[in-house]
Structures are given as C-alpha cells and as structure tokens.
Amino acid sequence: MTDATILSRQQGSACVHIQRMLPKHVESVVRVHMESFPGFFLSSLGPGFLRLFYKGVLNDETGIAVIAEREDVVLGFVCGSNAPQGFYRRLFQKQWWRFGWAAMGALARRPWMVHRFLGAVRMRVVSGDAAPAAELMSLAISPHAQRQGLGGDLVLRFLAEARSLGAVRVTLTTDRQANQHVNSFYHRLGFALAGSFVTNTGREMNRYEINTSMVSSIG
C-alpha cells in the first residue's frame, strides 16, 4: 500500500480523508467495529480478539487496510488481504494461543460458542485458501457517520489497492437473509453474486466478486 491519501471528502467545514490504516488507528477501528456490529459473533469475542485480528492484517505483507478519518476521528474502515490463500493460516497458526486467550472469557461464559469459534476458524482457513483473489474481509462505518458515501469511498480505495498489488478480482461474503441494504450496496458498486452457501451454524451467506479492472469505470 502507498502512504498517500488519495481521496478527501468535504463535509461541512471539515474534510474526511481516506488513507492507510496505521497501528495507532487499531483501537479506534476496534471501537467502530463494536459500534457497527453489536451482537455479532466476532464482536462477542471481545475487543482483545478484534485487536489481534486488525493488528494481524496490518502486520501481514498481503494486508490491505484503509480508514476514513475526520479531524483525527476514525469514522470507518475497510480491510482484507491481497492474497488470502495463506492469510488465515498464518494469522491463526502463529498466534493461536493469543487468539484463544483473548476469546477465553467469552467462550467460558458461553461454552456453546466453542464449536462455532472452531468452525469459523476452520471455514476461514479452508475457504480463504481456495480463492485466488483478493478478499475484502471487513467493512464498517460508525453509526453516526453512515449515509455519507464513506462506505463506497472505502471500497473503491480497497479495489484500487488490490489492483495495484496485482489482484484481478476481489471477493467478499455477507449475510444473505435480513441484510438487503448491504447486498444492494455491493450490487450498486458493481459486485456480482458469485454464489451462496450455508455455514456450519446454519448462517446463509452470499459470496460476491468484482473484477478490479472496473475500478476506473465505477470510481
């Protein structure tokens, strides 16, 4: 990734900058994640788990991580990997005990989550290794900053970064049910539905993909 800000959006008297995520932004990114996905599985594992994950993206040579920031306040972020074939394996195999320790409190309070946690890790390692494309893993906008076009700006920056690193396609997954606004959002950006599947916990998911050559035409 380059360090340069490639987009500024004027909002009132302040500019929103779309720029590279740095280690100093991780705590704010975790906050935005927790605000944006209350009650979701990863959020339930706690800030410590999320902190390790987002640090892992930054520290991995294939990681792509971008924030939207206004007056030093992180409003949203997007992250993923340019080569997810080995990302999850590296992330969990090298630091499995750290992730396990970070999630221990949540898993101890709700033992039934252990099966879901192990199943989710296994799914990410297997499915991530199967797709020879960049993967957009997480996108979130703080609730008070939504409907301002920041999600589209972040995704376009992600696509541009992936293309600059040689990725021909970008893939992502999102919930199929009760998630029409998100599915419509990706359709509007040019993503095509590549298939659907059901997780080991019965969660119905859509898988989308887009050719990075479309960046110039939709940006």
Image (cartoon, rainbow, N blue to C red):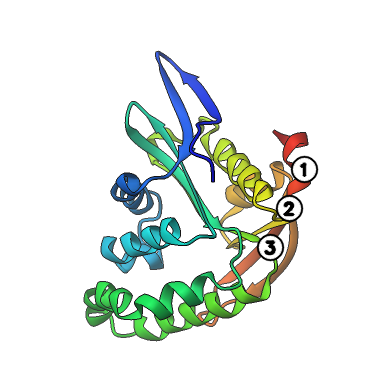
| Image point (40%, 13%), residue name | 13
Looking at the rendered structure, which numbered label has been put on residue 214?
1
* SS for callout 3: loop
Please tell me which of labels 3 and 2 falls first in the chain: 3
Q: Is residue 197 left or right of residue 60?
A: right
Is residue 137 visible in this depiction of the protein? no
Q: Is residue 91 left or right of residue 45?
A: right
* Residue that label 3 marks: 133
Evaluate if marks 1 and 2 touch, with contact meaning CB atoms under 8 Å apart: yes
Of tags 3 and 2, the one toward the viewer is 3
* Residue that label 2 marks: 210
Image position of 172 with respect to 115: above or below: above
Mark pair 1, 3: CA separation: 15 Å
* SS for callout 1: helix
- How crowded is the residue under tag 1: few (<14 C-alpha within 10 Å), some, or many (20+)? some
* SS for callout 2: strand
Q: Is residue 185 left or right of residue 18?
A: right
